[in-house]
Image: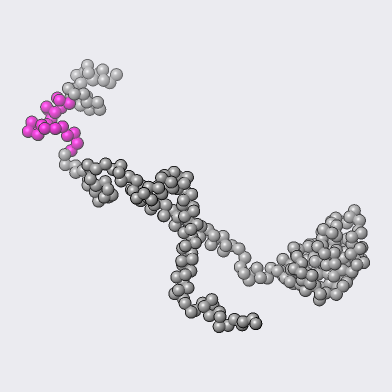
Amino acid sequence: MALAKTVYSLLFRRTSTFAVTIMVGAVFFERVFDQGGDAVFEQLNRGKLWDHIKHKYEVKEE
Amino acid sequence: MMSIAARRGAISSCLQFTKPMVNASVLSRLVKDFVPPASATGIRLAHTDIKVPDFSDYRRPEVQDPNKSSQDSSEARKVFSYLVTGATTVVTVYAAKTVVSQFVSSMSASADVLALSKIEVKLSDIPEGKNMTFKWRGKPLFVRHRTEKEIATEEGVNLGELRDPEHDKDRVQNPKWVIVLGVCTHLGCVPIANAGDYGGYYCPCHGSHYDASGRIRKGPAPLNLEVPFYEFADEDTVIVG
């Protein structure tokens, strides 16, 4: 509860800090949500995407 | 006025019941008149069949007990409320940002259009004194390799005798190469290279003469040939667009 109390008094109590918290939170949420979504997609389509089969077709430069 | 009239007049007893501020004597008289003596324990001016609603289903568990101070749990309840509000707003902001950026990016040019918007010209293919025509964004593009003599002539031109005064320096990045759009500024014909009175371009449609810098010198055209944006990638390549 001590953490919740700190969070409340530092971030949620004032409207200004609450708005800043939401904006910063949205930036992090966007990254997590987008990358999480991509990871799920790649997991579901494992072996079918170009990135997964690229090594078979790329010619190694000696 | 009304209260004086009511106190004095014959209808005073009737009016006093309807007055909003019921004083003690009126109240006691009212009780005596209308409340049966059997239920005279308290005065309920409201109807006694109204049930006070039970909101405990909607109350948080911390405030269910009426004998407990709600101050102790206020912090936790506020944190919960603001956390829910904040999380919802964060998701809304993300969704709104995504919708707006998707919409805006749908209006920008697609990759195949962007791929056509640039042209790479190999300069070593163009011999000195020659002009080559390329197709760029659906229009002819003139790339001219000038000789030393042409460069000297164009740089020496007096700006006062030009219709659209522009110095040769401002029209070329490298004086050896003149890159202009091959569209006559009069009515849009394609001029002929290395022709006309000034040795540059000549428009066969209405007889406009351009010099070797693409500037209008004679004829009906009002402006110099347009210089597109271009940059030299290296000594041998120029990228137009």
The N terminus of chain B lies in quadrant: top left
Of residues B102 and B222, the one drawn nearer to the viewer in this rendering: B102
* Residue most extreme to the left: B38
**Residue at the spot x=26%, y=50% of the render?**
B61
Q: Position of residue A38 (x, y in %)?
A: 48, 69
Which stretch appears magenta? B27-47
Of residues B58 and A49, the one drawn nearer to the viewer in this rendering: A49
Answer whether residue B97 is visible to the viewer in this image: yes
Residue B232 relative to residue B115: left or right: right
* Residue most extreme to the top: B8
In the figure, B33 relative to B231: above or below? above
Residue B168 relative to residue A11: left or right: right
Answer whether residue B203 is visible to the viewer in this image: no
- Total labels: the figure holds 0
Q: Position of residue B218 (x, y in %)?
A: 89, 61
Quadrant of res B163: bottom right
In the image, residue A53 lies in the stretch drawn in magenta: no
